[in-house]
Amino acid sequence: MPVLTRLIPSPVVVDIRSGALDNLAGLLADQRISSNGQLAFAISGGSGAALRERFGPALPQASWYEVGGGTIDDAIKLADAMKSGRYDAVVGLGGGKIIDCAKFAAARLGMPLVAVATNLSHDGLCSPVATLDNDAGRGSYGVPNPIAVVIDLDVIREAPERYVRSGIGDVISNISAVADWELGHRVRGEDFDGLAAAMARQSGEAVLRHPGRVPEDAFLKVLAEGLVMTGISMSVSGDSRPASGACHEINHAFDLLHPKRAASHGEQCGIGAAFATYLRGDRETSRLMAEVLRRHDLPVLPTDIGFDADEFVKVVEYAPQTRPGRYTILEHLDLQADQIRDAYADYAQTIAS
C-alpha cells in the first residue's frame, strides 16, 4: 500500500528562547549554514549599529549592510551591494522591514536567508512573502522561506511594546482569515488546505486563549511560535490565504485610503478580524477577540485609532477592492454603506456588553 507524503518547506532551525542570540555564530556554524562565517548581514541604520558591535567580533568574516528603508528600491540596492562578496547566506537582523528587504535580496542573489527578529510585529518573519513599498503603494513579492529563524525573547522585551501588540493582532486575525477561507471553499469550491488552515488557526487560538501578558516569557514564546507557524502555513498552502481574509482587506483599505493616519498592521487587522467575525454571526468569538485585544491594549473600534464611524464605513466598503478575486465575508454579504453602518453600530454595542 503506497504511503503518500508531501514535503513542507520550513526552516532547518527555529530557536525561540531567552538568550538565543548569545551563540548566534555557533548556531550558524553548527547547522552548516556558514562554517567559516562568510555572511552578509542586513541591519538598520539606527539600532543596527549596536547589533553590529555586539556580533561583529564573533563574526570577523561577515560583511554588514545598512538597509535604508522598506521599499522595493531599498531591497534592490541591498541585493546590488551584496553582489560584490561571496557569502554563504544573508542574515536579516532587525524588524519587519529589514527582514523583508533581506528576504528579497537573498532571493535575488539565490542565497539562503537567516531571519533574526528583534520584534514580533507581524507574521512575515517566516513567510514566503516580502512586503515592500513601491510606487503603487505596497506590494507582496514571493521569496523562499528562511533557512533559519532566531528569536531572542530578551531582545523582544527591549523593543517597544507596540510592536509586540501589533503581532498579537496579526496572529489572532488568523482565526477570521481561516473562517473566510472555509467560506470560499463552501460557496465557490475554492481549494482548501486543511493542514495550512489548522496551523494558522491553532496559532491564533493559542494566543487568543493564553492568559499571559506581553512581558512574560511564556506568552512571548507562544506569540513568537504562532507567528512562525503562520508563516509556514502560507508556504504549505502556496499563498497568504491562511492568514489573510476580510481582516487584511480592511487593514489594506485603511492603508490605502488614509496612508498618513493608518495605525500599525496588527492593530488594524485586529479590528478587522473582530468586525468580520461579527459579520459572520459569531458574536461570542467576536466578543472574546475584543476582550483579549483590549487586555493587551489593542484597539477594537476604529475610534480607538482616530477614525469615526463614517470613515470606517468607507474603509469597509472599499476593502474588497484591495484583494480582487479573494472571497471573504465582505464579498459574500456585499453590504451597502447603510448596511455597513448598521452592522458597525450593532458590533460596537455587542463588544461593549
Image (spheres, rainbow, N blue to C red):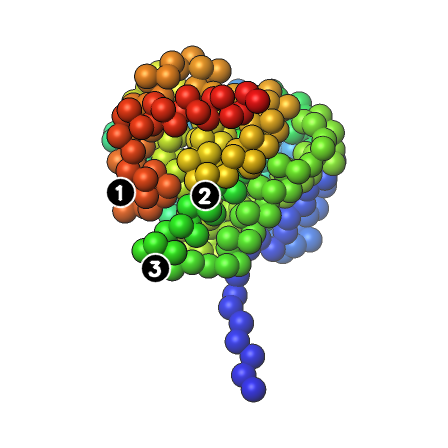
Quick one: label 1 or label 3, which is nearer the N terminus? 3
In depth, the one of 137 and 210 nearer the eye is: 210
Q: Residue at x 46, y 38 (%)?
A: 281
SS class of the residue under badge 3? Answer: loop
Q: Residue at x 37, y 41 (%)?
A: 329
Q: Is residue 310 above or below residue 7?
A: above
Q: Which residue is mark 2?
A: 177
Give the residue type at disc 1. Answer: Pro
Image marks 1 and 3: residues in contact by CB distance under 8 Å: no
* Distance from Cα at disc 2 to Cα at disc 1: 16 Å
Which numbered marker is on residue 189?
3
Give the residue type at disc 2. Answer: Ala
Find the residue positioned furthest to the bottom: 1
Quick one: label 3 or label 2, which is nearer the N terminus? 2
Would residue 290 be found to the left or right of residue 58 on screen? left
Q: Residue at x 60, y 55 (%)?
A: 12
Q: Quadrant of the C terminus?
A: top right
Closer to the camera: disc 3 or disc 2?
Answer: 3
Residue 32 position in % (x across, y down): 63, 56
Q: Residue at x 26, y 42 (%)?
A: 324
Q: Quadrant of the N terminus?
A: bottom right
Would residue 62 be found to the left or right of residue 154 on screen? left
Q: Residues within 10 Å of mark 3 (few under 14, many from 20)?
A: few
* Distance from Cα at disc 1 to Cα at disc 3: 17 Å
Q: Is residue 95 visible?
A: no
Q: Which residue is mark 1?
A: 324
Residue 246, image quadrant: top left
Image marks 2 and 1: residues in contact by CB distance under 8 Å: no
In depth, the one of 293 and 279 nearer the eye is: 279
Residue 226 position in % (x across, y down): 60, 43
